[in-house]
Image (tube, grey):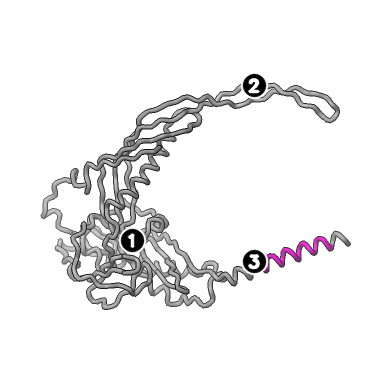
Amino acid sequence: MAEIEYIESSTQGEADEPIIDQDAATPQGRPCEACGCPIEAEDKFCAACGLAHVVEASVVPETIESGQKRFRCDNCGSEVATTAEQRSYVCPFCDSTYVVELQQWTDRQRPEFIVGFGVTREQAQEKFREWIKENAWFRPGDLRTATLADKQQGVYLPFWSFSMLAQSRWSATIGEYWYRTETYTTTDSKGNTTTHTRQVRETEWWPLSGNHHHYYAGYLVSGSKGLPQKQAERIKPFNLPALKRYEPYYLAGWLSEEYSIERDAALQICQQEFYNRERNNVAAFLPGNTHRALELSTRFHSINSDLCLLPVYILSYRYRDQVYRFLVNGQTGKCVGDKPLSWQRITMLIVAVVLLIGLVVGGVMLAQNV
């Protein structure tokens, strides 16, 4: 039986953090005016959209967190921050109006890193229009798509990123191939026999055990109840080398969600993923030609975690009491989604194809009889 043991030597990745001078840590950047991507003060161009900007003297930006409102959706459980001027709110994850305003900020962990939006709102809306037009004949005729794109919202979503060392003790039965020559005879229709030889593969099995270790990093776990891990996998990957140290002013003009999946729950998801990778790596590491009965006992050490905010455009809409969602990776532009289908039209197409096949077969049989 497989065994996984979790041993944490560092819970927040702070053990190896260098001492930072407070004056040097003063934020020196700002979001791009065109796309919102974080820009350092010395950057002459935006790395995401290429917009040129004037390099100005260092100014400590004003935090916007105190000027925001927080809402929690009673339907899906997501918690999103928006500007203080917004009086009404619809959940971007489930298109629900069952939201309540939260009065105070919680003491949850502050984000550590952020990736800015590299895709503009106009580009994201155009991606939706192109996507919704695909296979339009199968779409219900009463689905009003003209105003759906206006519901699309850019949101900074929380993701947990972990790194850890996996140490495993493994045992397996290793198989090595060898070949023997076999002689056999065949008899034809006239009763003549012929002798032949062929190579037959055999497998020799022998037990083996050992140790394996590997350092794993870079797997992102969704910290949002509104974006389950399966859907988060669909919009990956994100370009993590583009991560910048989080500062509140990066959120100006965008919605942001506070994590609703705690670190420990995300850690369990990540360690299961890393265990699967470790098992595959051990299997690839084994000698011989094949193996069976692989057993693995894995312990995780030196666990570090980072809370990151990553850019995603979300469009949720309802059709006949069912929620459909379209997602755009705000950094890479990758888009995925689900849309309603007209089963009446699909049934008509199937019937038409069956009738067409019947006509073709009938025509062929008639021609043969003639």
**Mark 2 secondary-structure assignment:** strand
Vertically, is 63 above or below 199?
below
Residue position for label 1: 225
Give the Cα distance between marks 1 and 2. Answer: 62 Å
Residue drawn where x is 81% and y is 29% of the image: 188
The reply to whether residue 58 is in sight is yes
Q: Residue furthest front?
A: 1
Residue drawn where x is 31% and y is 65% of the image: 78
Crowding at mark 3 (Cα within 10 Å: few <14, some 14-19, many 20+): few
Give the Cα distance between marks 1 and 3. Answer: 39 Å
Q: Position of residue 174 (x, y in %)?
A: 47, 28
Tag 2 or tag 1, which sits nearer the N-term?
A: 2
Main secondary-structure element of the magenta-colored stretch = helix
Left or right of residue 207: residue 219:
left
Residue drawn where x is 39% and y is 74% of the image: 150
**Mark 3 secondary-structure assignment:** helix
Q: Which residues are magenta?
A: 351-366
Label disc, if present, on residue 181 of the rendered structure: 2
Give the Cα distance between marks 2 and 3. Answer: 55 Å
The reply to whether residue 241 is in sight is no
Vertically, is 147 above or below 1?
below
Q: Amino acid at mark 2?
A: Thr
Label disc, if present, on residue 350 of the rendered structure: 3
Q: Nearest the camera: 149 or 259? A: 259
Q: Quadrant of residue 72?
A: bottom left
**Can residue 121 be found in the magenta stretch?**
no
